[in-house]
Each structure stands twice: as C-alpha cells, then as structure tokens.
Image (cartoon, coloured by chain):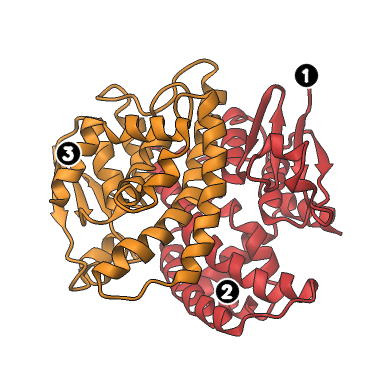
Chain colours: A red, B orange
Amino acid sequence: MAPLKVHGSPMSTATQRVLVCLYEKDLDFEFVPVNMGTGDHKKEPFISRNPFGQVPAFEDGDLTLFESRAITQYIAHTNADKGTQLLIMEDPIPKKMAIMSVWMEVEAHQFDRSTSKLAWEVVFKPMFGMTTDTAAVSEEEAKLNKILDVYEARLAQSKYIGGDSFSLADMHHLPNLGYLMETPYKSYFESRPHVSAWCKDILARPAWAKVKAMKA
Amino acid sequence: MAPLKVHGSPMSTATQRVLVCLYEKDLDFEFVPVNMGTGDHKKEPFISRNPFGQVPAFEDGDLTLFESRAITQYIAHTNADKGTQLLIMEDPIPKKMAIMSVWMEVEAHQFDRSTSKLAWEVVFKPMFGMTTDTAAVSEEEAKLNKILDVYEARLAQSKYIGGDSFSLADMHHLPNLGYLMETPYKSYFESRPHVSAWCKDILARPAWAKVKAMKA
C-alpha cells in the first residue's frame, strides 16, 4: 500500500494541523518538504495538487486532498479505530457531532482569522524584516479578547471546546496557539482560568511535541 | 415534536444558507426574524443562542446550533432520506465525501472571504449610505479572478463543484453568488463558460427561489 504523503512546510500552521492529526492517529506517513522560500508552492508539481498554491497537500494512494481541515476530517473518519478518537462519539452522536462542528467552524472563522493575522504581524513580519502594522494589531487584539471571553464561558461548562473529550475542534487550534504562546499574547490566554487550563492540556499532547520537533 | 426554528434575517447570507438547505430538504420550520437594524443579534435572548452575536441560530428541540455551515451539515446528515440528497453518496463514499469537503472549505476560505468583502463594498455600503473603499475593491477583484480561474478548471472536469451531483458544496455558494449576480461582477461569472453554466444551474433551483421570495 502506498504510504500517506504530506507535502508542506513544518512552519506552516495548516501543514502542522495535518501533521498533528497523523501523529494523534499513530499513522505512518511520508513528509515531502515544499520550499516556500523559493515559491515552490506556486509552481508545478505542487499546484497540480492544490490549484490555489497553498500548503499542505495530502495523498492517500490515488486520492489527493488539500485544505487542512478537510484533510483532518478525512483522516479522523477513515481511521476511527486507530490512535486517539478525534470525533465525539457520545450519544446522541448526531447532536454531539453537530456541536463539535459548530466549534470547528468557530475555530476556522473566528479564532483562526484573528490569530493568523496577529501571528503574521508579530511573528512572521519581524522574521522577514517587514514592519508590523500597529493599527491592524490593535483591531485584532480587540477581536481576540472578545473571542476568548466566549471561549472562557464555553470552557467553564465543557472540558474541551467541542465536547467532553479532546476532538478535532481542539486539535485545529494548536498551530496558531503554538505561535501566539511564544508572544506577549500568552497573557491573553493565561489570564482566563478555563482557557489557560485548556491551553496547557492540549499543548502538552505528545502528538504536538512531535510536530514542534519537526520545526526545529 | 417541536418544529425546527431558524432565528435570523432574510438579508443575511449565512441565514440564507440555512434557509436554502431547509427548502432543499422539504422540511417544515419556523422562521423567527431577528432585527439587525436595532442590534437584536447583539442582545439577549439572541446571544444566548450564539454568543458571537451573529445570525443565524438554529433550534431542533433541545439542540441549539450556530455557524451556518455546521447547521447545514447537521440538517443534511440527519435528514439524508428527505428532499434533495446534499451529500455525495457515490462509491468510494469516504473519498468522494472528502473531495466534497475540500470544496466546502474552498467556499468558506476562498470564495466567501472574497465575495463577502465585495458584496459589503458594492452592495451593502451603498445601501447604508457608506463610501465604497476602492482600494479594497481592486484587491478583492484580483483575488476573485484567480479563484474563478480555478473554479473554471474544476468545473470543466466536474459538473458540480463538489462532485458529479449537486451537494452542500454548491449550495453554500448561493447566497454570495445571489448578491454578486446583481452587480457588475456578474461578468466575472458569465465570461467563464463552465462557471457560467454552473451558476445558471444552481441559481435556478426552486429552493433558492423560495429564499429569494423571503427577501422581498
């Protein structure tokens, strides 16, 4: 059987999202680095795998996928019996899964948009010698504070963001969370007790340590 | 049995996404208008249904959901035997469903971001007496052109965006598409033959006509 393949960069949050999923699932895979510094994600052969020219792309035999959250859902559904159960399988399953989906959408549309912009301004721009846009930063800081107030209320009632157990909904937060915890925004998370406990819990997962080791 | 309830506004694209799904599925539901003009989406009782204060919210008995794409997935999965089949049920199902998921993510992260910004600038701002930001418009026009080039290539190979049959992946495009087709951006869609045929097909669905009638 052809091995699973991930084409991407260990620095990319979307690539990390797929890698942490594969490690949670204890699956063997081949990692194919894509050199974003030389723009290889905008050229063949990569753009045949993702016409939008964004990492990662994923291969399972003759199936090629892109979009990190579509890839993690495919991995979680087709490997339900391996490694960590990343879906919410409590009764009533359709309702519990729907609540997990709500919080997956919240991650994608609220958390990711805000934290990606902040990480771009305060982590990546300085790395590339670019100037941080302080007005954009202020706007996103206000948004992130509001988002984390909602998270604090949610996590006061639910151990994990998607339900009673760790799931894709939590896992999808790890890459952006990992970057922001190395910035002064760490205090945004640590000042809220339930958010803080949740961050500590999910950032300590062995699968996440394996992804961080790939960045080194 | 308590009826399904949608709390929202017929002008809101996210609300329309849920409404068209309910009509495709031939489900009875109660529509509860939320007056966004008086900010009712930012107040109780609405914010107990969605703490982010965004329409719509959805109720199925004791289950309350928000985030339009989580709601449509719940409706499609729990009513698989009613109305239009909105999932891709061809063999091999996990692979075909994964490809549908990829294009649902593309809609959410590429198409929606670009078309929502354009609709805001050229449809809603003039409606509210605000001034269109021409620099923002130019930037989004360039992005939309690139996105639609990818769509044209995809639709040359696949009748629908998520696979061989109409699915959630197509349906999710309708609200933003509906707004842009009433603007000069109509030419962006009509100048690409496969995109044009796809738009004509999905915009002609009776379920969409029912949503448009609610706006009137």
Q: Which residue is outermost to the right?
A: A216
Residue type at mark 1 is Met
Q: Is residue B166 above or below residue B190?
A: above
User: Which residue in the structure is indicated by mark 3?
Assistant: B210
Q: Earlier in the sequence, mark 1 or mark 2?
A: 1
What chain does mark 2 sit on?
Answer: A
- Kind of element beneath mark 3: helix
Q: Nearer the viewer, residue A96 or A43?
A: A43
User: Which residue in the structure is indicated by mark 1?
Assistant: A1
Say whether residue A2 is left or right of residue B5: right
Residue type at mark 2 is Phe
Q: Which residue is at 77% across, 52% downward?
A: A211
Neighbour class for label 3 at 10 Å: few (<14), some, many (≥20)? some
- Kind of element beneath mark 2: helix
User: Which is more foreground, mark 1 or mark 3?
Assistant: 3
Q: Is residue B71 above or below residue B41?
A: above
Mark 2 to mark 3: distance in Å? 45 Å
What chain does mark 1 sit on?
Answer: A
